[in-house]
Image (cartoon, grey):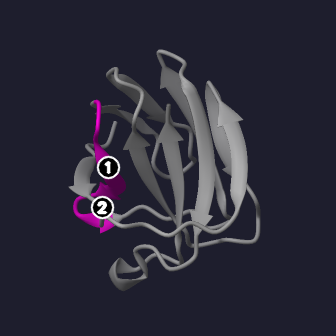
Amino acid sequence: MKAFSIVAAAAGLVFAGIVAGTGGAGADDYNYPGSCLVVQNHSGTTVDVSLNYPIHTGYWTSYPDDIWHLSDDDIPVTTPNGVWNVELNPSVDSTWVYDSGMNIGIGCNGSWVLTLN
């Protein structure tokens, strides 16, 4: 299993578009290839997030009030087809939002923001 690093994401985010997801959550809009994944944990609990992705399969822990984007050895992990598929443990309510301007300065074609509620 690859080691994943957690890097703080920028505050003051502006979101455009909404995709819903829960438990086994995923952003499944194919219009955003090259996008990154940002996690905001507003659930009040620690949540293990497993990434089901052919190239970067792994898991990491999200603590309450964390906001971060997924990277591998400080290189942002992007999706070639715009799809993210994650499992949450424990299962918490979640929402997906795509922000076309987020993290483009670090090599992302926008970011999918997974908010844990």
In this rendering, would 37 be left or right of 105? right
How crowded pointer 2 is (Cα within 10 Å; few <14, some 14-19, many 20+) is rated as some
Q: As shown in the figure, which amino acid type bears the numbered disc 1?
A: Ile
| Frontmost residue, 15 versus 29 | 15
Say if mark 1 contacts mark 2, CB within 8 Å.
yes
Q: Which residues are magenta?
A: 64-75
The numbered mark, 1 or 2, whose residue comes first in the sequence reads 2
Quadrant location, the N terminus: top left
Q: Residue at x 61, y 56 (%)?
A: 97
Vertical position of residue 4 compared to residue 81: above or below? above
Vertical position of residue 88 compared to residue 33: above or below? above
Q: As shown in the figure, which amino acid type bears the numbered disc 2?
A: Ala
Picture coordinates of residue 94 (x, y %)?
58, 34
Picture coordinates of residue 51 (x, y %)?
49, 39
Q: Residue furthest bottom?
A: 105
Q: Which residue is mark 1?
A: 67
Q: Which residue is mark 2?
A: 9
